[in-house]
Amino acid sequence: MPDIEQFEDEPDDGRPMRRLSVACGVALVLAVCAVCVILPWYSHPSLACGLAPLVTVGVVAVVMDRTKVRYRHGAARAHAVTDTVRRTLLRPLPGRVGTLGLASVYRACGGRGQVGGDLYAVVRKGGATRLIIGDVCGKGLPTFEDVTAVLGAFREWAPRATTLAELSARLEESFQHHLAESDDAGRDTNERFVTALLLEVRDGERFAGMVNHGHPPPVRARRGSVALVAGCPAPPLGLRSLRDCGAIEERFELAPGDTLLLYTDGLIEARDAAGRCYPLLDRATAWQWVRQGLVHHERLPDALGEILRDLVDHAGALPEDDLAMVALTRMEEPAAAALPWPAGEVRREDTGQLRQD
């Protein structure tokens, strides 16, 4: 996983500094009062004038140092707790699952020490690999409850559902049940939904399956070119008024050597100083790993790192929204050159979809 902290700015939180200023002011007043009360007992006024600033500066320095140390220790403990919670729920993806090489990057809104509403997970089912990437409506800590519900449902049903369409229905049912039991009075359940992309890659098959619940489409890199894997998205998980619209399982080619980029809207909605969104496809054609035409699975973290650097070049900093990306590549298999085309299927390279003859 690329080190996203190298792109982080220093946290801009004025509360510790305000507390530090108050503490220093109190210390200064106490020090001056002590000097003014105690030293007049002595018969050397000049000594009092010389010691007063020294005592004041010394006390202020001690108080500032103690306050800084306590703040740093507290911040470190808070970051450790948050990182543990996040890594427990958003488990780091393995570098290889089945015939796929994987890499991921995650950054919550606000940077380190925060949790957010983006999610991803991978599950192995027999000879297939199933993956989800999603984005809960909203930002920051209030969304984490919904993240937990979706990931829990995915890990429960991904190894059991027969098809992606069945998995999609199970996730919708589970999320609706979660919303019905939620006691968060500050959030309207009618405005709580999750965009999600479900992916299934079977060993030894040229085509992958996909169900899109209103999520940004993946980007496929192949032999130096990039294209969106378009489809017909179903409604996001949790939208009650649209739940009668069933999910559509679509298939697209994912040949050995192809690389797929999954992402949340934190990537494409990052804006530059003029307010322009990040032009994903235009920028992708200039990425070095795309121009090289083939990415070894061990180099996927470097590919994500290049995307992050390019994003910072465009926007000046990492986006204020939650951000998650997953890069995967299909590795060469022993019989990869002989992978058959499924009977009756014809390629449509422009959309990644299939047409049945």
Image (tube, grey):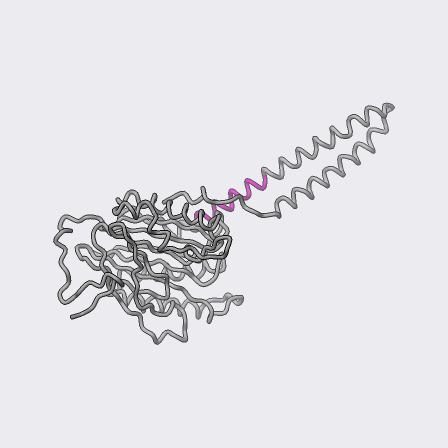
- Side of 108 relative to 13 (left or right): left
Q: Nearer the viewer, residue 19 or 265?
A: 265
Residue at image position (17%, 49%) is: 333
- Side of 330 relative to 173 (left or right): left
Q: In x, y percent, where is residue 288?
A: 32, 45
Return the residue found at the far right: 43
| Quadrant of the snapshot with the N terminus | top left
Magenta residues, as a range? Answer: 70-84
| Residue 80 lies in the magenta stretch | yes
Q: In x, y percent, where is residue 161?
A: 26, 64
| Residue 183 lies in the magenta stretch | no
Q: In x, y percent, where is residue 37?
A: 83, 33
Q: In x, y percent, where is residue 11?
A: 54, 46
Residue 97 can be seen, yes or no: no
Residue 136 is drawn in which quadrant?
Answer: bottom left
Residue 255 can be seen, yes or no: yes
Question: Does residue 285 sit above or below 20 in this rendering?
Answer: below
| Quadrant of the snapshot with the C terminus | bottom left
Question: Does residue 70 sit above or below 220 in this rendering?
Answer: above
Question: Does residue 208 sit above or below 328 in this rendering?
Answer: below
Q: Which of 195 and 79 is in front in this view?
A: 195
Q: Is the magenta stretch mostly helix, strand or loop?
A: helix
Residue at image position (48%, 59%) is: 139
Residue at image position (86%, 28%) is: 41
Q: Which of 353 and 124 is in front in this view?
A: 353
Q: Which of 267 and 170 is in front in this view?
A: 267
